[in-house]
Amino acid sequence: MRDRRAMFFLLAAAMCLLLLPLAEDDSRWVTLGVSFTYLVLALASYLDFRGRR
Amino acid sequence: MEDVALVFVILVALGFDYVNGFHDAANSIATVVSTRVLSPRLAVMWAAAFNFIAFLFFGTHVASTIANDVVVQEVLTIGVIFAGLVGAIAWDLITFYLGLPTSSSHALVGGMAGAAVAVGGFDVLVSEGIRKIALFIVLSPLIGLAVGLIITVVIAWLFHRVKRLDALNKGFRRGQLVSAAAFSLGHGANDAQKTMGIILALLIAADHLPAGADVPLWVVLSAHTAIGLGTLTGGWRIVKTMGSKITRLQPSGGVAAESAAAATLFATSAAGIPVSTTHTITGAIVGVGAARRLSAVRWGVAGRVVWAWVLTIPGAFAMAFAVSLVVRALA
């Protein structure tokens, strides 16, 4: 069984990274920040998932 | 004659703002109504009041972005702006009829772009502004989702030892009044400013204001009045989708979703980025559901919402393009 929530968050992080070329200098940090947040959420979700098993 | 046309198109722009409030009223009040904190009638009055007073708290950066950063000023005429508005309103009404929570904001951007391209080709689009808007089409729901999820987890962590659940729920019901007010404030700030931007562009196009002028106070007040009145008379078709079909919300979830969406709207309004209030609150509601487990979110409905997002700009673009050609032929 896989943690689908963590995979969803990883997908969201990847989507943000794919959007980086669209971002101007002043909004680049927002794109990176959201991507980083989703990476952290994916990790937290995975740890939660493993803890429950 | 040109002044008559100008007044007419300003009224159409305010009509769009009214439709925006009407269409998006569901976003402001869906969670308050679905958690039975307020009756539908009181909820719309609450939201409309905070829509109106938003002008006291935020500048007009979003208005400036709409007026200057979507299409080049030279191509903007009263006819082009009229065609863009008609395209956006038509798209909003179609999606409203179908019960899809689409975005009035992106309909407006798509409409303006379509009407301008019909006259001057794709070169008239301001790529920097369009790129920023496109970026935040995706980012705003993702930010809402992440913040909604984080607030939900923090609330659960802070209150998980509380035994008196009735008292806790009562507290969150009261809290939802504040979070719904904050969201309505953000909705009024971001969405009313789009209409201000259109009217500003009209006044510049008709040489009533110089390029780069600030938004006159009467424009600010009339835009907030129109969106407030729209919310006051808002429709109910979308409330069901937003309030209960995406995920079942408790009062604490309502507080988390609205606070997350409000925070996102405050930040983007301050930065002058026009975002969709619908996208933002939908993302936040999904975030609240996903904090429990992914299966708590009804992804079928969320998927339909995403399709509506994808179709909004091309749909409004195509309609405004056609209207612009007709206006040009008649002029």
Image (spheres, coloured by chain):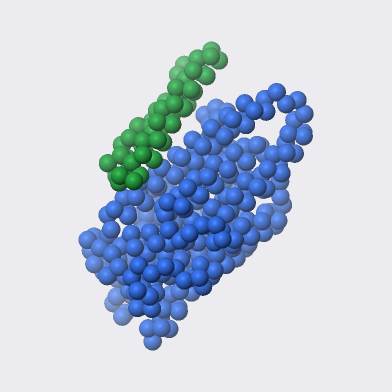
Most extreme residue toward the bottom is B1
Q: Is residue B119 left or right of residue B132?
A: left
From the viewer's perspective, is residue B35 above or below residue B63?
Answer: above
Q: Quadrant of residue B77?
A: bottom left
Q: Which chain is blue?
A: B
Please identify the quadrant where the N terminus of chain B is shown: bottom left
Q: Position of residue B187 (x, y in %)?
A: 53, 54
Q: How many marks?
A: 0
User: Which residue occupies the foreground of this view, B198 or B325?
Assistant: B198
Q: Judge whether B105 appears above or below B17 on screen.
A: above
Colour applied to chain A? green
What quarter of the picture does the C terminus of chain B occupy?
Answer: bottom left
The residue positioned 27% from the left and 41% from the top of the image is A21
Left or right placement of residue B303 versus residue B37 in this view: left
In this rendering, is residue B34 above or below B321? above
Which is nearer the eye, A32 or B250?
A32
Residue B263, percent across and down?
A: 53, 45
- The answer to whether one can see residue B238 in this image is no
Location of residue B79 (image quadrant): bottom left
Quadrant in the rendering for residue B68: bottom left
Q: Nearer the viewer, residue B168 or B218?
A: B218
Q: Residue at x 65, y 37 (%)?
A: B252
Residue found 57% across the figure and 54% down from its top: B185
Compared across the picture, whether B173 is left or right of B253 comes to right
With respect to residue B144, does B134 lie above or below? below
Task: In this rendered view, identify the residue nearer to me: B227 or B15.
Answer: B227
The residue lying at 45 percent from left, 79 percent from top is: B7
Residue B75 locus on image (x, y percent):
28, 69
Viewer can see residue B142:
yes
Q: Position of residue B322 (x, y in %)?
A: 32, 67
